[in-house]
Image (cartoon, grey):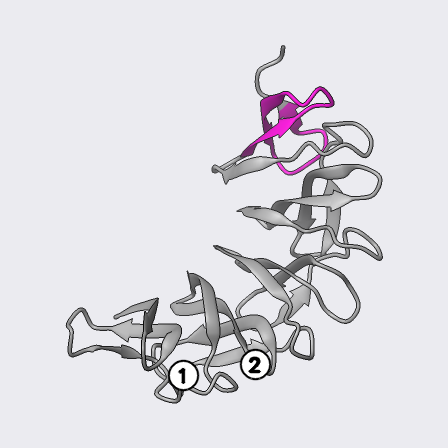
């Protein structure tokens, strides 16, 4: 079956399911109450045979949901941030699970992890602030991503999912300036990405997940 987002005049914008035929294409929720039916559906992501997505209701705001293509099999996993504000964005599926930016009652927009069983905060990268992580990729048991701190700006960080210890790999744009990492891609042994130096010139970098193993691919 195919699960996708769609719109019609009766049900509005929401989650749909299809077996590839017109007769077999229908909204997942027959009830169009926005207090029950998830709306603003985005980031449909397959993990471990299920489809996960970010969505909101009028009561909860945007949170993490899962569906099997039926109304009974569609549910919010957890209200990470209670109330109608919502918590989640930038959902990414990896072999280690789902990674995303979210806020909770104890931290701002920080990296979170769903391993198929539980949702947990990876690390409060920017204490009393918002590190706004993005670009999640995995290498063995590490998950690496760009995140912002007061001292070092936006740089690549890696969290060991077995210990939840987080390390900033390198202060590429030294000091508070952002290296603004982008296009993070994992291969068998390395993660490659582009980042800019203090002169705002982008270069290709690679890392094995350690500070000493983070190097510029082509030297000036």
The quadrant in which residue 12 appears is bottom left
| Residue at numbered disc 2 | 58
User: Is residue 207 inside the magenta stretch?
Assistant: yes
**Point 20% across, 72% down: residue:** 19
Q: Which residues are magenta?
A: 191-215
**Point 55% across, 77% down: residue:** 77
Identify the element where label 1 is drawn.
loop
Quarter occupied by the N terminus: bottom left
The residue sitting at the front extreme is 9
Q: Is residue 77 left or right of residue 155?
A: left
| Residue at numbered disc 1 | 73
- Residue 161: x and y in percent read 65, 55
Who is closer to the viewer here, 125 or 202?
A: 202
User: Is residue 162 inside the magenta stretch?
Assistant: no
* CA distance for labels 2 and 1: 20 Å
Identify the element where label 2 is drawn.
loop
- Residue 111: x and y in percent read 66, 56
Quarter occupied by the C terminus: top right
Q: Is residue 184 left or right of residue 121?
A: left
- Residue 74: x and y in percent read 43, 81
Who is closer to the viewer here, 58 or 151?
A: 58
- Residue 149: x and y in percent read 78, 44
Q: Is residue 167 left or right of residue 60?
A: right
> In this rendering, is residue 165 above or below 74?
above
């Amino acid at each position: 079956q195919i699960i996708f987002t769609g719109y019609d005049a009766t049900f509005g914008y929401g989650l749909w399911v299809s077996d590839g035929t017109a007769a077999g294409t229908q909204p997942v929720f027959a009830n169009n109450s926005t207090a029950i039916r998830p709306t603003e559906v985005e980031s449909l992501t397959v993990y471990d045979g299920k489809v996960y997505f970010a969505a909101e209701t009028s009561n909860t705001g945007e949170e993490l949901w899962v569906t099997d293509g039926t109304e009974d099999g569609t549910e919010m996993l957890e209200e990470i941030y209670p109330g109608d504000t919502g918590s989640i964005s930038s959902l990414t599926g990896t072999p280690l699970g789902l990674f995303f930016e979210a806020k909770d009652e104890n931290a701002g927009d920080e990296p979170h992890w769903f391993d198929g069983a539980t949702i947990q905060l990876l690390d409060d990268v920017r204490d009393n602030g918002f590190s706004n992580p993005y670009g999640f990729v995995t290498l063995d048991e590490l998950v690496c991503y760009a995140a912002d701190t007061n001292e070092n700006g936006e740089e690549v960080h890696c969290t060991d999912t077995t210990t939840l210890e987080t390390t900033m790999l390198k202060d590429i744009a030294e000091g508070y300036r952002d290296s603004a990492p982008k296009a993070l891609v994992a291969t068998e042994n390395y993660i490659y990405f582009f980042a800019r130096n203090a002169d705002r010139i982008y270069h290709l970098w690679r890392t094995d997940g350690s500070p000493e193993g983070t190097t510029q691919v082509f030297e000036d």
